[in-house]
Amino acid sequence: MLDLYRKDSDLSQKTKNESLGHLTVYTRDDLERMQAHNLGELLNSLRSFRYDENMLGMPDVLHTDPSPYSSDTVKIFINNHEITSAYAGSGLFIYGNIDLGFVDHVEIYEGSTSTAVNSEPAIVTIKLYSKDPAREAGGHLQAYGGSRGMNHENVSYAAASKDFKYYLYASRSDIRRTHYTNENYDISRDYKQKHALMTLDYKNIKVGAEYIDHKADPFLSLSMFAKPKDGDMSYKLKRVSSTMSFLDDDSLKLSLSFIRMNEHLNFNMDGTLWTTNPLDVILVTQDSLVTDSVDDVYSAKLEKKTVYKSNTFLLGANYIKKSLHDVNTYNNGVLDTEPTFVDNSIVGLYMQDDFAIAENQIITASLKRNQYYSKSNRAERNFHTFQTRLGYIATSKKSTFKAFASSMEIPTEQYALAFAKTNEIELLRLVDVSAEYARHINAATLGFCLEYLQNQNSKILIKKENIPRYYDNYSASVKYDYDFDPFNSLKSMLFYNRYHNPVSITHESVMGGFARLLNTYKKFDIYNEIDYRKIYSSEINGYVYNAGVRYRATQSLIFSLKGVNIFNSAATSRYSYITMNGLSPEQKSLYISPIDRTLSVGMEYSF
C-alpha cells in the first residue's frame, strides 16, 4: 500500500507540463527499478535521437561525424535552471552522463518547447529534478561496482520542517570504459568524477549549489589520424542558483544563477586539423595542444503568471551573459598570442497565452525576441532573433491530442565558428511541425507521433558543397504501453526517421524501437529492456539488451544486479580519420559503440 501511494503521488505529476511539447517521463519508480546509474542510460529509447559521444568521448546525442560537437540545440536543466556554456551553447557535454543518485525524476521534451522555457531555441529539452527533502527524510547510502573495475559511491541526507528543508548529496565515480586500439595506439574514454549538490528551501525561496570535478581520457582527441598518444581533459564546475516567489499566489518568480567552469585540455597526437591536401598531410608533425580556460554564465529571469477569464498569460524577461576568458593555449609548446575569447549578452522578452476554448481544450501561443550583443576573437555583431510557437491540446479520460508549429532562429555557436574558420555569425532558421495522438483503451495506451523539421543550411556549406538552402526531415513513431497492474508494465515504441546528414550531404533513414518490461514479484523488482537502431546504407546497426534485478531485503536495505548491453551488440558510431596511401591521403572510419557491455552489483541502505 505504501508503494502504491508513492507511485500515485509521484513528484513528476506536479512538474510535467503537457503544453511544453512531446514528453517522455522517467519517474522515481522507473529510475529505481531500471537501476539507472547515469543520464546516458535513459537516452536510448527515444524516437529522435540516442545516446552518443563525439571524438573526445563527450556526450553528444546529435553527433555528426566528423563535427567536434553537434548538440548545441539540446538544452539541459536542473530544478528549472538551465545548464549552458559560453563556448558550446549547451551543458550536455558534461551532464550527458551525470550520475542519477540525486535525481527524483527526468522529463525529456522532443521537438520545440514553449518560448518561456529555454534562453535560446532548442529541439530537445532535458529537465532533471532533484529529490524532495520532505520525501527523503534521513540518510541514504548507495554503492555499486562492476566490469573493468568501475565503481561508484554516493551518500545523501535530507531533513524538513514546516518552513525549512534541505537536501545534501555527494558522489564519487571511477568509470572504466572499454579500450580500443588503432595501429597500436590506445583509445580510452575512462573518467573519474566527484559530484556534490545541495538544495535549501525556506518558505518561498529555493537555493541550490553544485560542484563537479570531472577528469577524463581524451578518446580520439583531435587527431585526424586517430592516433592519440596521451593526454587528459578536466572540467571543474561550480554552480549556484536561487528561485524566489512573490505575491500571495506565487505568480511572480525571480530566478538567478551563476555557473563557472574551469576547463583544461592536454592533447598529444598526430595532426589536430582536418585536411585532405596531400602536402598538408605530409608536413603534419606530432602536435601537442594544451589549453586552459574559464567559462562563466550569469543568468536572471523574471516571470509573471496572470489568469484572466479563459486566458492564462505568462510574461517574462531574461538576461544571460556568457563569457569565455583567461584562455591560455599552447600549440606545440608555442603560446597563442591571439587566444579565443567570448563575451555574449542576451536580453530576451517573451509572452505566452494558454487559451481554454473548452474545459479540456487549450490553444497555446508564444513569442520571444532575443537581442544579442556578441563579441569574440572571431566576430563582433549585435543582432536579434525571433521564436514563435502555436499549439493545440485536447485531453479526455480516453485520449490526448497535441499539435505544435514553431519557427526558430538559431545563431552560430562559438565552437562552430572556430572549426569553420569564419568570422561570420549566421542566423539559421528552423521550422518544426508535429502532432501526437494517444488513445487509452482499458489498461493499454496506443499512441502515434508525426514530426516535420525543416532546417536552413549554412552559407558556408551552400557555397562549398552546392547544396540547397533548406533540408526537410521527417519522423514517425507508434507506441504501445500496457499496465498489467500498478507494479507490472510494458512500454514499447517503433520509429522511422528520414533526415539529411549535413556533413556527408546525403539522405539517411533510421529505423528503431524499444520494449521495456518492469515487473515486481514479492521482494524482487525485475527489469528487461531491448533497444534497436539501424541506419540504412551504413554499418551502424545493432541492439542493446539490458536486464536487472533488485532484492528488497528490508525496508532500508536493497541489493541489486544489472547488465548493460549484455550481448555487446549495440549500434556503433562512426569516427572518420585519415591514412596515407603513399603520398595520397585516404579517409577511413572507426566504428565504436558509445555503450559498453557492463555488469554491476550494488547495494543501498537508508537510515
Image (cartoon, helix red, strand yellow):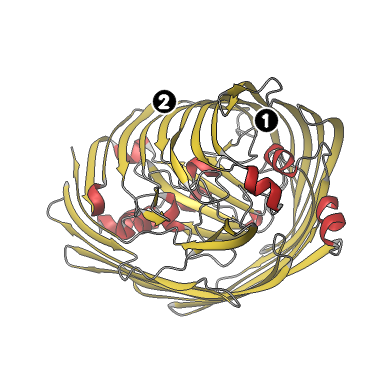
Quick one: 316 or 500, which is closer to the camera? 500
Q: Is residue 186 above or below residue 316?
A: below
Image location of residue 260, percent across then percent down: 55, 24
- The C terminus appears in which quarter of the rendering? top left
State which quadrant residue 438 falls in: bottom right
Identify which amino acid the numbered label 2 is placed on: Asp
Label 1 or label 2, whichever lies nearer to me, is 1
Quick one: 213 or 356, which is closer to the camera? 213
Categorize mark 2 by other alpha carbons within 10 Å: few (<14), some (14-19), many (20+). Answer: few
Image location of residue 184, percent across then percent down: 38, 53
Q: Which mark is residue 561?
A: none
Which residue appears farthest toward the bottom when viewing the image? Answer: 441
Q: What element carries label 2?
A: loop
Identify which amino acid the numbered label 1 is placed on: Lys
Residue that badge 1 annotates: 301
Residue 323 vs residue 577: left or right?
right
Q: Is mark 1 on a helix, strand or loop?
A: strand
Instruction: Tell me the CA gap for discs 1 and 2.
Output: 24 Å
What residue is shown at x 60% (from left), y 64% (from top)? 48
Residue that badge 2 annotates: 163
What residue is shown at x 42% (from left), y 72% (from top)? 543
Q: Is residue 475 visible in this depiction of the protein?
A: no
Q: In this view, does 207 lie above or below 469?
A: above
Image location of residue 295, percent across then percent down: 59, 26
Quick one: 548 or 471, which is closer to the camera? 471
